[in-house]
Amino acid sequence: MIKINLFTGFITGIAANIAGVFLYIILLSKVGIDETLQDAVARGYLGKIVALGAILNFVPFFVFLKKKQNYHAKGVLLATVCIAIAIAIQKFL
């Protein structure tokens, strides 16, 4: 049961990050999603967009904590850490 709760939190964290990226692009970009992502890859700032999208992970994290679903919250935190590590690796390669 613990592994399922952790996995559910992890998937929720990844989904929240993806939603945060799309929300950031929709609200602040003057061009479409495809053009913004292609430009981000070409100019090397995709990691910054993904990091800004991770801000949305605060919502499920604190909702899970409020509901005392600690393993779900740990899964969201694990997803955030994995995303941070992926951004750091992408930055240095």
Image (cartoon, helix red, strand yellow):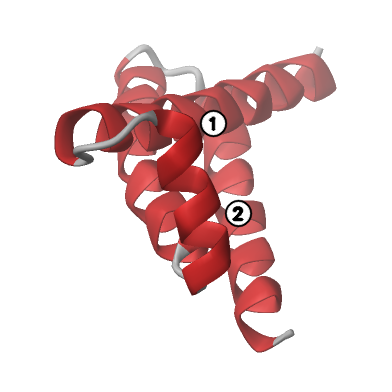
Q: Which residue does the numbered mark 1 point to in the structure image? A: 13
Q: Quadrant of residue 59?
A: top left
Picture residue at 63% right of the left edge, 46% below the top: 78
Q: Is residue 56 above or below residue 9?
A: below
Which residue: 66% across, 23% down?
11
Q: Locate residue 4, reporting x and y percent.
A: 79, 15
Q: Where does the image place residue 91, in percent across and percent down from the top left?
A: 60, 80
Looking at numbered disc 2 in the image, what kind of residue is underneath it? Ile
Q: Residues within 10 Å of mark 2 (few under 14, many from 20)?
A: some
> Mark 2 or mark 1, which is nearer the start of the sequence?
1
Q: Quadrant of residue 2?
A: top right
Q: Tell me the quadrant of the picture where the C terminus can be found.
A: bottom right
Q: Along the horizontal axis of the image, is 33 left or right of 4?
A: left
Q: Which mark is residue 50?
A: none
At 17% from the left edge and 40% from the top edge, which residue is drawn?
28
C-alpha span from label 1 to label 2: 10 Å
- Residue 5: x and y in percent read 70, 17
Question: Circle 1 sits in a helix, a strand or a loop, which is it?
Answer: helix
Query: Mark 1 near mark 2, Cβ–Cβ under 8 Å?
Result: yes
Name the amino acid, label 1: Gly
Left or right: 78, with 24 as reference point: right
Question: Which numbered disc covers residue 83?
Answer: 2
- Quadrant location of the N terminus? top right
